[in-house]
Image (cartoon, rainbow, N blue to C red):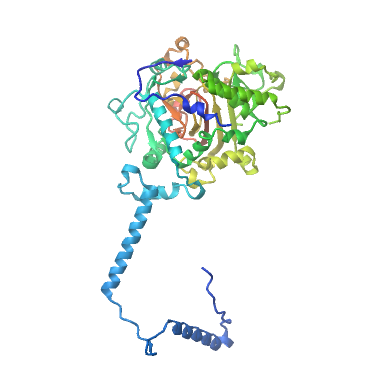
Amino acid sequence: RPFFGKGPVSSPLSNHKITQYYLLSNKAAATVPFPKNDGSTNNMALEHRRTAASSLQGKTNRKSKSGTVKRRRRKSDPNKAACIAAATFATVFLSIGIVANHFLGKGDDSNTIVSASSRRFLKEWTPKGKNMEIMSSQDAQILKQKEDRYHSLYRPKFDEKTLGYDIYNCPPQPPENYPMAWKTSEVLLNWNPNDVTTMAPNYREVYQGLCVFDYEKHYEIALTYRNLEKPFVIRNDPKVMAVVRKWDDDPEYLHKVLGDVEEYRTERSPVNQFMWYRLRGGKSNSPAGYQVPPNDETEMPFGEWLEHALDKDAKALGSVELAARVKAMKERRLSRAGNKSEGGDEPLGIDDEDNKEQDDEESEESKESKWYYFRINAALKGAKKGRIDKFVYDELSFFDPRKREDSSFYIVDPKEERGINCRFGMRGVIAANHFDMSRNMIAIFGGERRYVLGHPSQCSKMALYPRGHPSLRHSAIDWSNPTEWDKHPEFKEALINEVVMHAGDVLYLPTSWFHYIVNLGLNFQCNARSGITEENAHHIKKCGFA
């Protein structure tokens, strides 16, 4: 349902981007061979060398008009030679400077002296060859429209004076109170997670404490924060933006790759809240009084999932054009015959074939009323064999541990890489609060998501299901329902912050940080994990998770 919040914006923008998004159905020198230089041929070899030298000297001599040969070399002027050398050096140096400034410059900061470490970074991270893409004026305009819309709808509530640091120009070392956090009751009452549609001229005030780094300007600072295991967002990485231009800007790119026939693992739910669970041994081993969450898994072609996701957007935005697009997609899907084919992280569900619900054919009305979470789990093992795993690793080279020039920032520990997990979300889908036992890089390649984050020190206040529970590590209460918070009064005192990510953003989430995910519309997200750190292990152990 649309939310009509506070105040007007200076330049109102509509959701034109989402509507537009899916309306596009020296020749080699001759050499004289020399005989082997053994004892019997020394004289012959010497004669060859003399002949060659004499021939070369004859070619360089020039006759005067009188016919005499001038053999004496002209004396060189030392001053003139020095001037020529200096001019040549200056010309070459200036040319290199101009070219470097053109390709590696920082706009208004182009006069800044580049440090040795920055030169190392630029050498290693500048896209090369076919990956070097010059943005067209049309692409630049599209990007500007997206940025204007994003910054007009989602505004940080607090400035530098309140936070003690500027989130867009953070200091080289993390501030003592970084990242700033606020009580859950304050953050969630300010913006209820179920309110996912914000339309200009309204906007949201975001309780943002995380720094946002520009990859081209703040790489070294971001690296410092990462090495200190502090969360942050980094954007404007040319490699990431190249994927955004394909996945987000091209309406049919992913559709053509993933198609309408092959089925992929997809979570579904009659409600928008998704809770991970795992029942090992079947329902008989579930805790007393345990009720299985309503979400389960099915398999679905990308084209059908896309149709349902766009349908949610069309209804929320009131877009007639988008609704027409959805209708056409549905008609084509229903007209196709014989389009089913047999198609993880660990799949959710029940480890008992006898207790699994049969995936009966759903009515179209039932499908339209549900929410779906489309998933692709790619592994290096599969990438070597081809298939969809290879596509994912080829597209996301910065998540590929084999390509260290591209991935050294994002894949911290390549030996502990755990695959690339992609979850494509639709408007309204919420993933319950939880923590993971490894560091995580989370990238958005299209659309927008809201992440609500909590430090591991808040573990005892997060109302978590304990070890041994099917949904261990996840919050037991509905964050969008204030009436449930009274079941765990400590929850209202937990400290959290939030950030709205959009296409091109990458979130670094250290080990065991809590995250609650709200999908604000159709979006494409992939993440990669690489290694475990222990700086917050004592907080997690105190909560009963060893």
User: To which quarter of the image does residue 289 belong?
Assistant: top right
Q: Can residue 231 be seen in this view?
A: no
Q: Where residue 453 sits in the image (x, y, percent)?
A: 43, 25
Q: Can residue 400 be seen in this view?
A: yes
Seen from this angle, which residue lies furthest front?
65
Seen from this angle, which residue lies furthest left?
79
Left or right: 482 with respect to 156?
right
378 versus 52 height, above or below? above
Number of numbered labels in the structure image: 0
- Say which of 222 and 472 sits in front: 222
218 versus 450 height, above or below? below
- Residue at horizontal 59 percent and vertical 88 percent from the top: 40
Q: Where residue 101 sits in the image (x, y, percent)?
A: 36, 50
- Say which of 192 and 530 sits in front: 192
- Say which of 475 and 312 sits in front: 312
Q: Where residue 278 sits in the image (x, y, percent)?
A: 61, 23
Left or right: 31 with respect to 67?
right
Left or right: 58 with respect to 289?
left
User: To which quarter of the image does residue 67 belong?
Assistant: bottom left
Q: Where residue 363 sits in the image (x, y, percent)?
A: 67, 16
Seen from this angle, which residue lies furthest right?
338
